[in-house]
Image (spheres, rainbow, N blue to C red):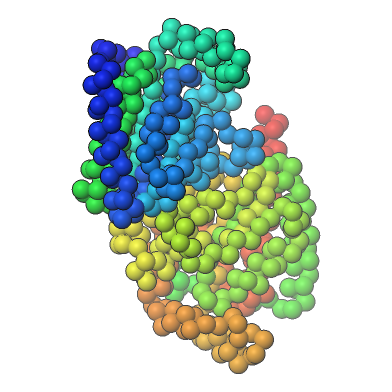
Amino acid sequence: MLKNFERKKSEDKDALNAEIKEIREKLLAQQQLIRDQKLPVLVLIEGWAAAGKGTLVKELISEIDPRFYNVSSPAVVPESEERYPFLYPYFSAIPENGKFMFLDSGWMESTVRKYLRHEITKEEYKRRVRQVNEFERQLRDGGYVVLKIFLHIDKDEQFDRLQDLVDWPETEWRVTPEDLWQHKEYKRFLEAYDEFMEKTGGCVPWHILDGSRKKAAVRDAMKLLYTRIDQALAAGRYVGEPFEEDFPLQKMPKLKDVDLSPAIDGEEYKKELKKLQKRLSELHNMIYRKKIPVILCYEGWDAAGKGGNIRRVAYPLDPRGFDVRPIASPLPHELNRQYLWRFWTRLPRTGHICIFDRTWYGRVMVERLEGFCTEKDWQRAYNEINEFERQLTDWGAVVLKFWIHIDQETQLARFTERQNTPEKQWKITDEDWRNREKWPQYEVAVDEMLQKTSTENAPWYIIESNDKKYARIKTLRIIVDALEKACDEAFKRQME
């Protein structure tokens, strides 16, 4: 790619300016159509230091309504974001429907620099390449227009530009030690950029532009952007086809086959609760020191006892080191982005615990059954969710998923008690009764969810909750066992 790149011949300046003006007017006319069709557009500008990435972004946004675009420079991730998964700053930056996001460098620059600095291993590099391909495909399948541009200049051109910046006091600050190191290691970067683009160009292609011809690069970038948007507007919002990757899955029973009789007596419950909560408190300190992130996911039937279960897990934890994330219907700004965005932006930092009360699995349950997404969307989501959770465990997170399970008779008894007890009436809504009427449909959806997403790295646990006390103890035991195992593995890695 870069090794075989051929520079274009110089073009007439007036002709270039005329072309740029014409394309700019076309882009201006597209803005209202983008908003009307709710088309989200993500533009990634990568390239060499001093190649003109910032200038190119400035030209691209010059005629766009400022209310409908954002510009971000997430290539150099701040220390605060280093405590999140690799894709966190990029997934967090995706635009709303009908808006633009321009990234001045991004996932390629971050990955290549860390790899050449030996800050990530070859195995981590391969994982990042896979994650980038998953990320870009998920955006494309969710209807995003994604455009990737690389601004290319040769080593001599880069030297001249860096020197010009250094020689002028007002611009000297723009040249960083990282930029000088890149110039010194130009050949290594060239090979690494080439390899990265070859490995990540299958779903969303790379476009290499000649950064030494500034006006021509602006014209070519505008033309690429206009063409991609025009194609998307003409074809309508893209919806990706469902597909299945071969994830290592655990065999799960059907809900109807689960024995819900397990129970625990009151004295044993108090004893076990005290012991397990004490151990969980100790483990919370250990995972904080070892920087192990923990993600606990709760799903289950209405009135199954999720809230009480979560309270017993949260009680022994240091409140500075955990969050409980109750997930309700998406807000407008959440609904206008790829559905996993609102979960990416709620992830815990390393060493912290995040408890999700309802999760991304709403995609294959309530959204599926209530028609809030298309059939292709929810069928595709099984694989997307498995990818998401694999990215979390690749990062080092402990991911545990609990289905809090009761039978219909127990649910009816709890609904009735809530309705007849004034201080509990807030817990019961008309929607709860409507969902109860759809129990058979939900059971089919949950069974399919459990079968397709209980992976070895992020397993599902069915928690029998006809007896709430038993459910709490079982959940605490699973969490304690998982955290002890994670701490032991972290200790072994430190000793290697």
For residue 269, above or below residue 151: below
Left or right, residue 163 beside residue 45: right
Residue 136 location (% of width, % of height): 38, 41
Q: Which of 396 and 328 is in front in this view?
A: 328
Query: How many numbered marks are there?
Result: 0
Left or right, residue 352 beside residue 236: right
Q: Residue furthest left?
A: 234
For residue 72, above or below residue 426: above
Residue ID at (37%, 15%): 212
Q: In which quarter of the image is the C terminus?
A: top right
Q: Which of 332 and 496 is in front in this view?
A: 332
Residue ID at (36%, 44%): 41
Q: Residue furthest bottom?
A: 420
Q: To which quarter of the image does residue 417 belong?
A: bottom right
Q: Quadrant of the N terminus?
A: top left
**Residue 331 visible in this rendered orientation of the protein:** yes
Residue 53 location (% of width, % of height): 44, 26
Residue ID at (30%, 54%): 37
Q: Which of 274 and 161 is in front in this view?
A: 161
**Residue 141 visible in this rendered orientation of the protein:** no
Residue ID at (35%, 63%): 373
Q: To which quarter of the image does residue 102 belong?
A: top left
Residue 198 location (% of width, % of height): 35, 26
For residue 251, above or below residue 440: above
Residue 173 location (% of width, % of height): 61, 20
Q: To which quarter of the image does residue 463 belong?
A: bottom right
